[in-house]
Amino acid sequence: MPKVDICRGSSHFIDTIKGIATIRAFKWSQQNFLLNNHLVNSSQRPAYLLAMIQQWLALVLQLLVAALAVILVTLATQLSPSVAFTGASFVTLITFGVFLTFLIIAWTNLETSIGAVARLKALGEVVRPESLPGEDVEPPDEWPTRGKINIRNLSASYE
């Protein structure tokens, strides 16, 4: 598949919707199907990468908690502490692991949201407003006063 500008993707989807009859008439359906799939995959790549990073971090944290659990079991078997304290420490350790995983996922979501807000802020500063002075003219209520369409010697065909 040829390299396609991602910014072109959203306009390509809209053009496909508007021109679906033309695409079918010229038998371009397969080409557009492949291009649309490529554009969707390209646009979702950052989301996939973010999900993979979150899963990797969750795995690392779970392994860290498992290592701490092994150390806790070793201490519990060697030192013979109270059963209640050992059980409470296991529950605390599991809760700590779940909390760390939640914290990492929340942090990455926060970073993503801050990046989106920064991009929107930059876009708002760069793009000029479309409502320029003098462009808000409304036609009078009596407009148009009259209208007329003349068609002469018209010929149309469909093949």
Image (cartoon, grey):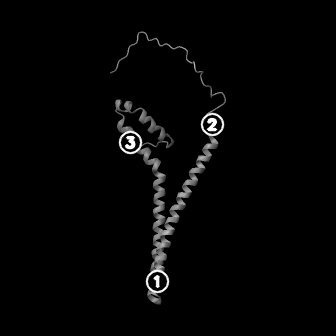
Q: Position of residue 6 (x, y in %)?
A: 49, 43
Q: Is residue 27 left or right of residue 51?
A: left
- Residue topped by disc 3: 34
Residue most extreme to the left:
159
Which one is in front, 150 or 63? 150
Residue most extreme to the top:
153
Q: Residues within 10 Å of mark 2 (few under 14, many from 20)?
A: few
Separation of marks 1 and 3 at Cα, in angstroms:
58 Å
Q: Position of residue 148 (x, y in %)?
A: 49, 13
Instruction: Provide the secondary structure element on which disc 1 rests.
Output: helix
- Residue 46 against residue 57 in the figure, above or below: above
Q: Residues within 10 Å of mark 1 (few under 14, many from 20)?
A: some
- Residue topped by disc 2: 129
Give the image quarter of residue 2: top left
Whether tag 3 and tag 2 are in contact, CB under 8 A, the answer is no
Q: Residue at x 58, y 21 (%)?
A: 141
Q: Quadrant of the C terminus?
A: top left
Separation of marks 3 and 2 at Cα, in angstroms:
36 Å
- Residue 99 against residue 129 in the figure, above or below: below
Q: Residue at x 56, y 50 (%)?
A: 116
| Amino acid, disc 2 | Pro
Q: Residue at x 41, y 9 (%)?
A: 153
Q: Is residue 83 left or right of residue 26?
A: right
Separation of marks 2 and 1 at Cα, in angstroms:
65 Å
Name the disc covering residue 86, or none.
1
Residue most extreme to the right:
133
Which of discs 3 and 2 lies nearer the camera? The answer is: 2
The tag earlier along the polypeptide, 2 or 1, is 1
Whether tag 1 and tag 3 are in contact, CB under 8 A, the answer is no
| Amino acid, disc 3 | Leu
Q: Residues within 10 Å of mark 3 (few under 14, many from 20)?
A: few
